[in-house]
Amino acid sequence: MSRAGATDLHTHSLRSDGAFAPAEVVRMAAAGGVAVMALSDHDTLDGVAEAEAAARPLGIRIVPATELNTESEWGDVHVLGYFLDPADAKLEERLRWLRENRGRRIELMVERLSELGHAVSLERVREIAQGGALGRPHLAQALFEAGHVTSYDDAFLTLISKDSPAYVSRVGLTPLEAVELVRAHGGVPSLAHPRTVIGLEDRLPLLVEAGLGGIECYYVSKDPDIHHGPERTAHFLALAERYTLVPTGGSDFHGRGEHGAPLGGVPVPPGTIAALEARR
Ligand code: AMP
Ligand code: ZN
Ligand code: FE
Ligand code: FE
């Protein structure tokens, strides 16, 4: 369910692993009643200008953002960085390095899949990505097209999940480096879908010390381990209060229905963006 005036602080487009162009995401968000939308493509701010151009006549506010995924003994720590500047050349240099890492990782996974008898062409994976930051969703689509799996979700369940033999770990930033990178460039970092972090209660003080400003308390997922029901939301709101973090939230819309909420479909309190901005 979405409401007029809704806030959605976690969305993806074709500039990373979403299925729709930034302008289309904005139009769909508007149709769903969204008034404030962060475009948070992985490792890029490339889609922000297009989103802003589409948002202007619709009266929607676009918050420039990115999602930095880290993988370590801390589990999957994904850091959303808000209010970053797409024209910041030093930041872009770091993001470009992260996108190059993404590309190499997918190349390695394509090689392993081929050795395992599930050949897909890297060219096709790149075509599916349409120039966006490469990720496993593009690979999942290619595996489905090639008939190696029965559905997009099945690719994640069987061939490219973390425990699959074709899986290649991400190299890049540590969780603390991701938080620091956002802060160093004038942004406000928020911890995305905190259920994917291992040992959160022990790590959170360190993330806060590094500059964390928010935590995604409002989140829904088809994965019951990651989904926030009312009890988990209350738990994360209590953590937010303990560490004076801004409770954030969003749909994590990619356009394939995989995260379980339409644009604007996760209720986020109206004052959230002002509270985040005050943490710059
Ligand atoms: P990557 O950054 O290449 O590791 O890909 C991570 C992305 O894959 C996430 O942002 C999700 O969009 C998607 N994803 C991860 N796990 C699943 C899953 N089990 N089913 C569908 N999509 C998934
Ligand atoms: Zn994604
Ligand atoms: Fe994420
Ligand atoms: Fe995301």
Image (cartoon, helix red, strand yellow):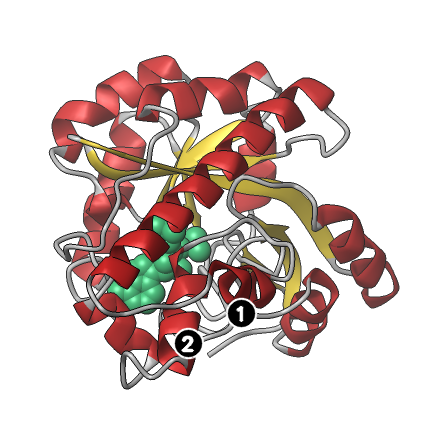
> Dot 2 surroundings within 10 Å: few (below 14), some, or many (20 or more)?
few
Left-right relation of 260 to 62? left
Quarter-wise, where is residue 159 in the image? bottom left
Residue 201 position within the rendered picture, expressed as x and y whole percent measured from the top left: 14, 30
Q: Please report whichever mark, 2 or 1, sits nearer to the chain's N-terminal start.
A: 2
Q: Quadrant of ligand 2?
A: bottom left
- Residue in the image at 53% along x and 57% along y: 11
Answer yes or no: is residue 37 visible. yes
The amino acid pointed to by label 2 is: Gly
- Residue in the image at 27% along x and 80% along y: 149
| In the image, the residue with mark 2 has its CB under 8 Å from the nearest atom of ligand 1 | no
Disc 2 target residue: 257
Disc 1 target residue: 263
| Mark 2 → mark 1, Cα distance in angstroms | 10 Å
The amino acid pointed to by label 1 is: Leu
> Dot 1 surroundings within 10 Å: few (below 14), some, or many (20 or more)?
many
Quarter-wise, where is residue 240 in the image? top left
Counting the numbered discs, the total is 2
Residue 171 position within the rendered picture, expressed as x and y whole percent measured from the top left: 34, 31
Answer yes or no: is residue 221 visible. no
Q: In this rendering, is residue 56 above or below 20?
A: above
Residue 267 position within the rendered picture, expressed as x and y whole percent measured from the top left: 44, 63
